[in-house]
Amino acid sequence: MNITDQLTIGEYVAQDFRTAAIFTKYKIDFCCKGDKTLDEVCQKKGLNAESIQEEIFSVLELKNDDGIDFKSWPTDLLIDYILKTHHVYIEEKTPVLFAFLDKLCKVHGERHPELFEVNKLFNVSGTELLNHLQKEEMILFPFIKTMEKALIENKTIEQPHFGSVHNPITLLRGDHETEGDLFAKISALTNNYTPPVDACNTYKVTYSMLQEFEQDLHKHIHLENNILFPKAQKMEERFSILD
């Protein structure tokens, strides 16, 4: 990895996803707010940038045979991976969590009133996420595939109704940031997904699922914000050069 002082958190993770574990440990957002440098984030959070940088170097020195270089993937393959891995995950897990959280509120809400706020926040998150997926699947993703196909075949394309890809990408990045904020609140309310001592199995499973959901969401947003969206914007620039 080529490390410079100007490398953003998102660029670190885009080049080697193993660095995500380090940023997560220090509660540094590498997906929704990954456009800041390590120094900028550490100054704001009161963290030691040099010691974190040393941890990053230690991880990068380890052999990484199992790592997936998503940056090298063509955009159509990356889109299909996001759809089949992360979009399907959200579509499958969201209704299950809706039901579990409703049940927890009914059974445990009197002793643990924070559950009502967790339920409210996840209902907002889940509902908005499902709408967000539709925007990607119906508008942006098909156009990115159209651009890639046209470049391969050396053809031109018509300008889409949304103008530049910068417009939907800006809206989608905003959605991502909203989701990150919602889950930061959920994590705080659940004490980082730690069930109380009187938690039943459903309680424990629900918290575990919420934590897994957030982790999957971070990977999902990272692939889009830090890899797919920049690829799409560079692709669009090539059409400007060809015109």
Image: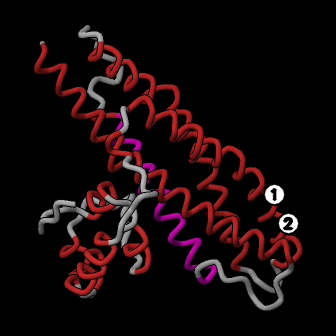
User: Depth check: 104 or 110 in front?
Assistant: 104
Residue 110 occupies quadrant: bottom right
Does residue 188 show up magenta in the picture?
A: yes
110 up-or-down from 133: above or below: below
Q: Nearer the viewer, residue 73 or 134?
A: 73
Q: Residue 167 lies in what quarter of the image?
A: top left
Q: Which residue is mark 2?
A: 103
Does residue 43 lie above or below 197 as drawn? above
Q: Quadrant of the N terminus?
A: bottom left
Q: What's the amino acid at mark 2?
A: Lys
For image coordinates 81% across by 63% down, the residue present is 100
Q: Looking at the picture, how far across and down is residue 142, in whole percent?
A: 45, 23
Q: Which residues are magenta?
A: 168-191
Way the structure is coloured: secondary structure
Say whether residue 191 is left or right of residue 200. left
What kind of secondary structure does the magenta stretch mostly adopt? helix
Residue 99 is tagged as 1
Q: Residue at 32% of width from left, 54% of height from top? A: 14
Residue nearest the viewer, comparing 196 with 113: 196
Which element type, helix, strand or loop, lies under badge 1? helix
Tags 1 and 2 in contact by the CB under 8 Å rule? Answer: yes
Against 151, residue 220 (above or below) is below
At 12% from the left and 65% from the top, the residue drawn is 4
Quadrant in which the C terminus appears:
top left
Question: In the rendering, which numbered label is found on residue 217?
Answer: none
Callout 1 crowding tier (Cα within 10 Å): few <14, some 14–19, many ≥20: few
Q: Position of residue 135 (x, y in %)?
A: 50, 33
Extreme residue in the right direction = 107
| Residue name at image x 33 percent, y 60 percent | 16
Report the amino acid beneath label 1: Ala
> Which percent across, then down, holds residue 178?
46, 57
Residue 115 position in % (x across, y down): 72, 74
